[in-house]
Image (spheres, rainbow, N blue to C red):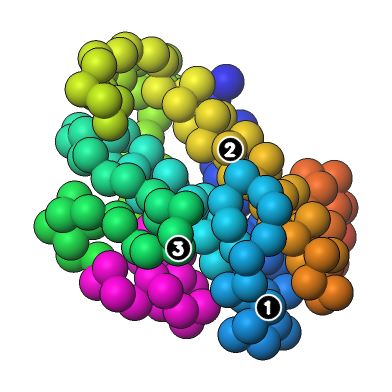
Amino acid sequence: MNTADIHTLCAYNRWANRRMFSALEKLSDEQFTATMQSSFPSIRDSVLHILAAEWLWLKRWKGSSPRATVADTSNAFAMGSALSNGGVAVDKLATLSGLRGFADSIEQERQEFLAALDDNALQARLRYTDMGGKDFSMPLHYLLQHLVNHGTYHRGQVTTLLRQAGAETVSFDLLFFIREEEAKAATA
């Protein structure tokens, strides 16, 4: 895994998140917050989980190990002091526009982080502490790949929830991203 590969994966993640938000913007507030059966109790909570993980891993990659929690099963947002201390207004994460703003701020910070990476940094082991206080160490490239895979998994769940809500869905497949990128390159 090299920086070009990581940049491609992260560009895919950005593309998929943007496509997800384009589908979510068509929902009513009731559809966005309705209780459903999945890993998280609503579309909103599923999106919050994706973004909370992106925020958490970005902080770990940059050398801190926050102890944030995701929304509990009662839909009460309990992101905790870690997010508040990180400059995130927790109450804004209850709305689609707040979540989109959160996603945009994560993406901007991630782009700055990625711009400074080289192949040696990708191979280096990153030490971090999980939310339970356990220490881990893994090569950074695996952790970056994990984040993209995690988002893909949960965006698939969002697709299922969109179908349950009777809403329009979009494809998040990597091949669609690659086709779009190849088409852009061919016309440039």
Q: Which residue is mark 3?
A: 75
Task: Verify whether residue 26 appears in magenta.
Answer: no
Query: In this image, 162 relative to 91: left or right?
Result: right
Whether residue 103 is in magenta: the answer is: yes
Amino acid residing under circle 2: His
Q: CA distance from mark 1 to mark 2?
A: 24 Å
Question: In the rendered view, does 28 fall on the left or right side of 55?
Answer: right
Residue 184 in view, yes or no? no
Q: Secondary structure at mark 1?
A: helix
Amino acid type at circle 3 is Asn
Pointer 1 residue:
31
Q: Residue at x 28, y 68 (%)?
A: 90
User: Of discs 1 and 2, which sits in the foreground?
Assistant: 1
Callout 1 crowding tier (Cα within 10 Å): few <14, some 14–19, many ≥20: many
Identify the mark at residue 150; answer none if there is no mark: 2
Closer to the N terminus: mark 1 or mark 2?
1
Viewer-closest of 145 and 72: 72
**Which segment is the magenta one?**
89-108
Comparing labels 3 and 2, the label whose residue is closer to the camera: 3
In the visual, does 40 lie left or right of 134?
Answer: right
Write the residue at 63% across / 72% down.
Answer: 34
- Quarter of the image with the N terminus is top right
* 118 to 98, vertically: above or below: above
Viewer-nearest residue: 20 or 70:
70
- On the rendered image, what quadrant is the C terminus found in? bottom right
Q: Of label 1 and label 3, which has the lower sequence position?
A: 1
Q: Amino acid at mark 1?
A: Gln
Percent coordinates x, y for residue 169 in the rendering: 83, 67
Q: In the rendered structure, are the residues bearing label 1 and label 3 in contact, judged by CB atoms less than 8 Å apart?
A: no
Is residue 113 found left or right of 7 in the rendered image? left
Gap between marks 1 and 3, in whole Å? Answer: 14 Å
| Res 83 quadrant in image | bottom left
